[in-house]
Image (cartoon, coloured by chain):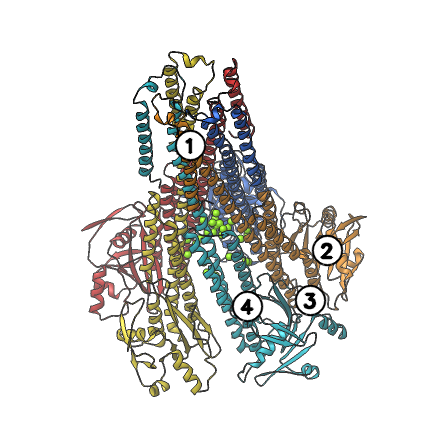
Chain colours: A cyan, B yellow, C red, D blue, E orange
Amino acid sequence: MKCTSIPGIGIIVQWKEGVKMYFIIQDGMIEEVEESEWKKSEDAIGIFTVEEWKKQLELNNNHYFNQQHDSVHFCKLECHAEYLYGTLCILDKVNLKKSTGFAFYIQEGRIIFIDDTGFVSASVENIAKIRKRREYSMERFLYDFLLLLIENDLQHLITLEREISKIEEEVLIRKSENFNGRMSIIKKEIARLYRYYSQLSDVGEGLTENENDYFAKNDITTFKVFTDRVTRLRSEALVLREYAMQVQDVYQSEISIRQNDVMKVLTIVTTIFLPLTLIVGWYGMNFKYMPELKWEYGYPVVILLCITVVMIGIWIFKNKKFW
Amino acid sequence: MKCTSIPGIGIIVQWKEGVKMYFIIQDGMIEEVEESEWKKSEDAIGIFTVEEWKKQLELNNNHYFNQQHDSVHFCKLECHAEYLYGTLCILDKVNLKKSTGFAFYIQEGRIIFIDDTGFVSASVENIAKIRKRREYSMERFLYDFLLLLIENDLQHLITLEREISKIEEEVLIRKSENFNGRMSIIKKEIARLYRYYSQLSDVGEGLTENENDYFAKNDITTFKVFTDRVTRLRSEALVLREYAMQVQDVYQSEISIRQNDVMKVLTIVTTIFLPLTLIVGWYGMNFKYMPELKWEYGYPVVILLCITVVMIGIWIFKNKKFW
Amino acid sequence: MKCTSIPGIGIIVQWKEGVKMYFIIQDGMIEEVEESEWKKSEDAIGIFTVEEWKKQLELNNNHYFNQQHDSVHFCKLECHAEYLYGTLCILDKVNLKKSTGFAFYIQEGRIIFIDDTGFVSASVENIAKIRKRREYSMERFLYDFLLLLIENDLQHLITLEREISKIEEEVLIRKSENFNGRMSIIKKEIARLYRYYSQLSDVGEGLTENENDYFAKNDITTFKVFTDRVTRLRSEALVLREYAMQVQDVYQSEISIRQNDVMKVLTIVTTIFLPLTLIVGWYGMNFKYMPELKWEYGYPVVILLCITVVMIGIWIFKNKKFW
Amino acid sequence: MKCTSIPGIGIIVQWKEGVKMYFIIQDGMIEEVEESEWKKSEDAIGIFTVEEWKKQLELNNNHYFNQQHDSVHFCKLECHAEYLYGTLCILDKVNLKKSTGFAFYIQEGRIIFIDDTGFVSASVENIAKIRKRREYSMERFLYDFLLLLIENDLQHLITLEREISKIEEEVLIRKSENFNGRMSIIKKEIARLYRYYSQLSDVGEGLTENENDYFAKNDITTFKVFTDRVTRLRSEALVLREYAMQVQDVYQSEISIRQNDVMKVLTIVTTIFLPLTLIVGWYGMNFKYMPELKWEYGYPVVILLCITVVMIGIWIFKNKKFW
Amino acid sequence: MKCTSIPGIGIIVQWKEGVKMYFIIQDGMIEEVEESEWKKSEDAIGIFTVEEWKKQLELNNNHYFNQQHDSVHFCKLECHAEYLYGTLCILDKVNLKKSTGFAFYIQEGRIIFIDDTGFVSASVENIAKIRKRREYSMERFLYDFLLLLIENDLQHLITLEREISKIEEEVLIRKSENFNGRMSIIKKEIARLYRYYSQLSDVGEGLTENENDYFAKNDITTFKVFTDRVTRLRSEALVLREYAMQVQDVYQSEISIRQNDVMKVLTIVTTIFLPLTLIVGWYGMNFKYMPELKWEYGYPVVILLCITVVMIGIWIFKNKKFW
Ligand SMILES: [Mg+2]
Ligand SMILES: [Mg+2]
Ligand SMILES: [Mg+2]
Ligand SMILES: [Mg+2]
Ligand SMILES: [Mg+2]
Ligand SMILES: [Mg+2]
Ligand SMILES: [Mg+2]
Ligand SMILES: [Mg+2]
Ligand SMILES: [Mg+2]
Ligand SMILES: [Mg+2]
Ligand SMILES: [Mg+2]
Ligand SMILES: [Mg+2]
Ligand SMILES: [Mg+2]
Ligand SMILES: [Mg+2]
Ligand SMILES: [Mg+2]
Ligand SMILES: [Mg+2]
Ligand SMILES: [Mg+2]
Ligand SMILES: [Mg+2]
Ligand SMILES: [Mg+2]
Ligand SMILES: [Mg+2]
Ligand SMILES: [Mg+2]
Ligand SMILES: [Mg+2]
Ligand SMILES: [Mg+2]
Ligand SMILES: [Mg+2]
Ligand SMILES: [Mg+2]
Ligand SMILES: [Mg+2]
Ligand SMILES: [Mg+2]
Ligand SMILES: [Mg+2]
Ligand SMILES: [Mg+2]
Ligand SMILES: [Mg+2]
Ligand SMILES: [Mg+2]
């Protein structure tokens, strides 16, 4: 026995590892059945591990279902002559780097999942629990299954937007810490989501096209609803990306403004002290014939001169809007 | 009793909170009627709160209209098998952060709003007041209702353009204050509008497509007019975004120019005073055998030397176009 | 009587203000006629002021032609059930801020302009003067009229390109004055034109689509020629925008290069004078026991030391390619 | 007699200036014929100067072929009701600023060039020399003619790519001279080519559409091959543009890095010399009661102090990775 | 005999150079046959060198297959009236600069490769070894052949992503070496791949369109699967490009931050030492009447003054968040 928490649902379900599972859809219900019954039923759902599926193919000497199931990098749907073949990735919204995936074959009235992660079994059992309408069908099941992949995603996007918004406020009051590091993580997550939704919407469109006529025309509409939802999520991801780029621009701008401020301080300090240093250096010269040095009021006059220089400096900088 | 000011109209209308409202369209008029009459009429408009609608569904043991009505984040239209389901957000152009929304179901000759905000009741009553042509229909009503969502928007966009233009002028005469903060608000508002119009135009296109044939072919043309108007508004939002980005570039450019100016001041001051400081330091040295110090004209010659150095410095900087 | 110079033609035509004008197209001619004849003719062109049109509608108790004619912000064409309704803006290429506009209704064989500016009357009379082919039609008239809106535009775009090119050359020889201010005006003009052509091409496409079948199929081809011309102008505007952005980048780059040059001057001056200042300060110290000060060759050796320091400094900077 | 080198071929051909030329396509050959034969032949090619063409139109009192032939700015193809009208520009790949153009009319089985440059006569004679297949047709001739316009263009693009690549390498080893000036020329040439290919592909598409059914369906495929070739060239131009923008970014980045280096030198020099200058200034003070000055080991201790300060400075900068 | 390692497979195959090779597809097998048999078979594959192909054409006096086979710059497919003509480039993922290519002609049931590199012979022999399903066809062979061109490409893209990710991490901890040089290579490789996939997907689409009806309708689906795979790879290349641009922005940002830090050090050092230098210069003045100099506590007071100045400086900079 093993446990999986379903990303996108948050429910933990137990399931039997490494054991084939057979379901059929009947009278608005998804029921687990024996292999023998499953084989002769319509609207049948099967779940195999990669290992089991290889055994099955060897037993039946079947070379049609010969796609690679090992490494899943995309959500995709390929329309082959004999079947639809697809893979799906599940984004883990907590651990951003992890992602798991599985493959599936669809034929008329039959869908077979090749899944080592346990996500599919848990999801199917979970969908089975929810009450259905009478005319529940394979297409409705697929729709419910696909919806699981994007459940809570809008909330996730809103969380990301809030994070960017918070960083933007910090930048605008010039209190941002480790800006590039934090934005880099957010931007990668947005790119990951954008890619995910792009691929999912391709899958949705592939199902809607229904080239092999595996799906009933009436129920195709559900795939369109799914596709539109994913497309809206992708639009939101794009909006977020624009927002992130805009905040990056503001940050870059603020760095330049801050540099200008530092430069002004340097220039003011230099411009005020260099003339003074010249004056005091001047009367440090050792010429024998320098009348000022012996003049009684020389020292007070130099003091006044220095004060005047400082005043003029400050006046000029104030005038030129240096601060 | 409760009051709502309708964004987009600016009229305050009273309406009965938490009470179902039933309207029918008859002879070019929108009339409020009793539930019994409403149920058997064609071209019927119903307004419910989320609470009331849930009760209705339970009473009728109906599981078809089972969409989530709680949180409205998009303007969207979903074409389900049994009905069109949509949600609409109303942008508040005064309080940029606030936005309210409601849901609606459309079937042939019947539209039901699920609205807790009171916007719909007020709007419908308002539309009812305006004189109609004889052949007024559900499609015409929907068109009038959708137009309310974008009324005054062009004016709002023109206001935004003027604000950007004002900021640009300030930047060009180098008198901008809190540029990044102000532009940030404007850019967000533009993004918000762009997103709003994109979604509204998707809704308009969905109505124009008329997949379930709920709408009369003749009146579909009104939805196309609405879609085109929204699309033009979206184009304007895009133009504004381009403009804002352009002003941001000019600002960045002006910061660099200003920094160049500060650097030039620093360089000029340093280049003029360092040689002078060296000269006066030179004659501050305490060597026993320094003939100049005892020379009668040493001091006047040094004064002339210093003046020459300053003149050369100024001449060089003038020549190199430093100011 | 009043005068208008027609933008796009450059011809000044007198016309009667506030007076309805009626034209019909007959035997390859556009002739002014009386209202009575106009009303029963096919291929009729009418020109009204906003005021007169309102009166007309009230007289006929007509509520169909109820569009707003007051403020024209777009070039647009709306395909309503009963008529085509459109507005057109005329860009004034001399006074960039001014633009005037008018509205029009099209029905089968009838076009009505609602125009307070006098542009339409002047243009129609102008078109009437040019010799026509025998089979002159409403579609040919519309085509001639639309062409007026973009006459000389290519020349205007070429002028803009030359201005940008001139600014670019100034930037490359580092002699640009008020770059941001000048480019800002050009960029706004390009954006204005791009928007204008985008909208005009939408109008052209709307006419080409001919949804209400108001236009003869044979003559639709002229609208397509117009649309393609406008689209080419829009492409040119896009090319100009790209060019302007490229020049902006070059300018930004030149600012950075100039700043590098200023920094290098500062660094060289500082690096050469600070060591010298240290040396002369060193022998300004008042220690009792400083043998060098009493040494006969102390002073000449310090002079040699300073020259050596300067030489090394210059050698290092030459070596590091500082200038 | 006059000579023209055909851009895109590199062959110099003599031709009779200001003289009409008449060709017909017959039995897989292009033959020059007399006007009388030309007029009654199918698949006829005529070449006129602008002047001659005007005379022709006046002679025949013909007002259909009334397009402007004077100034050619675009490659374009307009599908008028009575004929196809187009203009073509020939890019001169050696002299980037020069470009020449000509106009043409196409009707069923007849093409008329209006050309003052001599390019067309030379090209047609050149095409005539090459051996043809038996079923040579007007469409095949047009295809051969259009191919001349893009011959050697791929080579030209590869040359441009190599130039950019060379500039990039110079930038990366920090030895670029007049970067902005050189890149500016390359970017303009790329934009010019991109525009040229965009327009040519529009022409190709216009021919492929074959709206007036002037061309045989079988031979339309050649226009599609031409269009695809031009589209590929346009893609290459876009790739080059991206590359140029990338190199510009690298250059900008290198300027910043270099500035950082200059700033570090300034900071190190200042930070090391200012404390030393303070120390030697300190013992230049003239206080009566300064015990150190009279101390026997004062001077050596100050020397040690200065050495220590320098060492600490160097150690800090090494530690902070300043060089 | 000669050896080739097949990029994309990694298998080294021997093949006979400069010798024609003839294959036919029969009963799910690819078999090498004699020329005579090959000529009369359907589903025949021929491989020629450019030299041999020229000889063939001369022998048969054939001028149809007259495309240039010498220099292959694109992957392309041209749909001529008599045949499909295409070229394919093979990207060498180890040696980024090298790429080899070959041409091919397709007619109904016949494909002829013109290849000097040996890649095709090796690939065909390799494909021949793998067991086929019974109904193996020309279309299936083409699909297998095309898949070879993108085998392992996903792995290559993942490697590139890891490299960028590594560089990004180095930038974020400010330890990047030769950033621009390394990123430049990666960006060029991404551009190369993007271009390659764009062209391959055009080829795939060209095959899917099947304009000349050379391919069986049932097997067209395999070309669509190929096209979709290439399109997904292209999307990944685009994602990588975005990522690379984002890292470039972070790098640029980090350079600015570092420059700010350097500027702050300079400003702090200058601001603290210039006032001190002024003070010590002050008491280095040689005025006869300077009471402080003779005052017993003058020296200690100056020491205290200097300490106070330093303390104030540090306090100000701490307060202003200078470090
Ligand atoms: Mg989008
Ligand atoms: Mg969007
Ligand atoms: Mg994108
Ligand atoms: Mg956007
Ligand atoms: Mg951008
Ligand atoms: Mg941007
Ligand atoms: Mg940008
Ligand atoms: Mg637009
Ligand atoms: Mg966009
Ligand atoms: Mg845009
Ligand atoms: Mg735009
Ligand atoms: Mg930009
Ligand atoms: Mg364009
Ligand atoms: Mg363009
Ligand atoms: Mg654009
Ligand atoms: Mg462009
Ligand atoms: Mg861009
Ligand atoms: Mg750019
Ligand atoms: Mg491309
Ligand atoms: Mg483009
Ligand atoms: Mg590209
Ligand atoms: Mg681009
Ligand atoms: Mg870019
Ligand atoms: Mg960009
Ligand atoms: Mg940029
Ligand atoms: Mg993509
Ligand atoms: Mg993408
Ligand atoms: Mg692209
Ligand atoms: Mg992307
Ligand atoms: Mg872009
Ligand atoms: Mg960017």
Q: Which residue is mark 4?
A: A205
Task: Tell me the crowding category of disc 3: few under 14, some 14 to 19, or many 20 or more residues within 10 angstroms, Cα based.
Answer: few
Label 2 sits on what residue type?
A: Ile
Q: Nearer the viewer, residue B57 or D103?
A: B57
For the residues labelled 2 and 1, the Cα–Cα distance comes to: 84 Å
**Residue E225 x %, y %:** 63, 64
Q: Are marks 1 and 4 on the same chain?
A: no
Label 4 sits on what residue type?
A: Glu
Look at the numbered disc 3 and say if its residue's Cβ is closer than 8 Å to ligand 26: no
Q: Are marks 2 and 1 on the same chain?
A: yes
Q: Nearer the viewer, residue B149 or A191?
A: A191
| The label number, if any, that marks residue D1 in the structure image | none
Sequence-first tag of 3 and 4: 3
> In the displayed structure, would residue B200 be above or below residue E282?
below
Q: Which residue is mark 1?
A: E300
Q: Are marks 3 and 2 on the same chain?
A: no
User: Could you tell me which secondary element the residue under label 2 belongs to?
Assistant: loop
Res. E202 image quadrant: bottom right
Pinpoint the chain carrying mark 4: A
Q: Is residue D133 visible?
A: yes
User: Could you tell me which secondary element the residue under label 1 belongs to?
Assistant: helix
Pinpoint the chain carrying mark 3: A
Q: Is residue C162 visible?
A: no
**Residue E12 shown left or right of residue A167 in the figure:** right
Q: Which residue is mark 2?
A: E9
| The label number, if any, that marks residue A67 in the structure image | 3
For the residues labelled 1 and 4, the Cα–Cα distance comes to: 86 Å
| Residue at 40 percent of width and 20 percent of height | A285
Label 3 sits on what residue type?
A: Gln
> In the displayed structure, would residue E161 be above or below residue A322?
below
